[in-house]
Image (cartoon, rainbow, N blue to C red):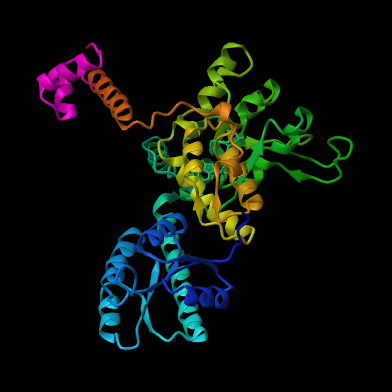
Amino acid sequence: MAQSNKPDLLIIEDDKGLQKQLKWSFDQYNVILAEDRDSALVELRRFQPQVITLDLGLPPDPANASVGLELLEEILSLSPTSKVIVVTGNDQREIAMQAVNAGAYDYYQKPIQPEELTLIIKRAFELAKLEDENRRHFQQQKESFHGIIATSPEMMGVCQKIEKVAPTDVSVLLLGDSGTGKELLARAIHDISPRRSKNMVAINCAAIPDNLLESELFGYEAGAFTGANKTTMGKIEYANGGTLFLDEIGDMPMALQAKLLRFLQERVVERVGGRESIPVDVRIIAATHHTLEDLVNEGKFREDLFYRLSEVVLNIPALSKRNGDVVLIARSLLEKFNRQYSRNIRGFSKDAVQAMEAYSWPGNVRELENKIKSAVVMSDSNQITAKDLQIDEAQLREMPLNLRQVREAAETRAIQRAIVLSDGNISQAAKLLGLTRPTLYSLMDKYSISS
Ligand SMILES: Nc1ncnc2c1ncn2[C@@H]1O[C@H](COP(=O)(O)OP(=O)(O)OP(=O)(O)O)[C@@H](O)[C@H]1O
């Protein structure tokens, strides 16, 4: 069933006639009806509506508000951000106040006038939206470090290193597969550095033909070659005072590597066809998905340049190696594309979350970005499903969902690490793990770990 982008409104009402009337009156919302406690809880879990109207007189005892008040508590504990408007009988003001005291957003006394109730509902939606935006904003500030969204220890470590290295002028080499965020990280380094008010200039050494790369980097004088009509500054000069980001440095031709090395040693550029030495002050950040040592061994990359560029090396882990990051980044991307394409998709279905966690993400964050963008544009529902993400099932990693298996794998890893860190000293390892020696021995026995 195709669903609309209308906001979900859950109406909990046991009077069939009234249900019909309300559904008809509120057609600007996606009205979900529930007639008793059980069906209300099912729909609440399914839709997590921002606004709910709750008639306190529910079966099995519609004359009494006790079932309704209990349900109100359950709703608020399951979905604390939902705005609940309680509906009571005309003579039940005291009960209505009790409900508001318990956390209901507002109350409305029967008989229902749809226009009046519409106003209260509309206000509740506006407030819910505002609160939602504030929460997301706060959450994003907490989780985003200069645009880098991360919660995994692996990426937290990278961010900490970036904070340390940024204020200095040392050359940084970022190593990681395509789409892992190398350019984003380079930008973060520039943004935190004292050079932030000057340019960060990025050049992709793999994307520019060899014969043009030199003039792109170093600039050229008028008449230096056919078509060089006027003297033009190169990227290095543009970055003066700021940062030069050399992406895919492993693809730089050997001849140019020599010229770059000379620049790094002397800190002056000579434009193509020029004689003047122009001093330039730039901080260099380079990145590659190649293993540069291999290229050095194969004679394709200069060893002396490699050492110049790699004063600090940061390894950027693949997305599949970042514990907990995929769903976090996916949520933030969903927000971004909802705004960009004026959609109102509320979240991801359970199977989408499972598929995202089990997928190997060979294209890393860029692939995640593409999949979410396409799902946001194409989805007919208010939730993104695994099918919307078009995740290739053959690429799903085996992920145990059985908690015992997960715990055992985690315990094995922690014990192995502790033993390595304490050089095989079991007393020391037990201390690190917060265990007694006999307990550690019995766990090592259980998981067949030797010291
Ligand atoms: N941790 C992250 N949080 C949010 N967005 C991210 C993150 N990492 C990467 N991205 C986004 O993913 C996309 C790809 O990142 P980026 O271009 O920095 O990767 P890259 O490693 O430089 O890729 P390539 O090697 O292919 O040039 C960008 O749109 C970037 O903003």
Q: Position of residue 429 (x, y in %)?
A: 18, 22
Compared across the picture, whether 285 is left or right of 377 comes to: left
Name the one closer to the observer, 153 or 24: 24
Task: Choose between 100 and 260: the one closer to the eye.
Answer: 100
* Residue located at (50% from left, 31% from top): 318
Magenta residues: mostly which secondary structure? Answer: helix
- Would residue 129 be counted in the magenta stretch? no
Q: In this rendering, is residue 292 above or below 377?
A: above
Is residue 274 visible to us here? yes
Quarter holding ligand 1 = top right
Residue 263, horizontal then vertical, whole percent: 61, 32
Q: In the rendered image, which quarter is residue 435 located in?
A: top left
Which residues are drawn in magenta?
421-450
How far from the left and from the top, in percent, is residue 361? 54, 33
Answer above or below: position of 165 versus 39.
above
Left or right side of 415 for 225: right
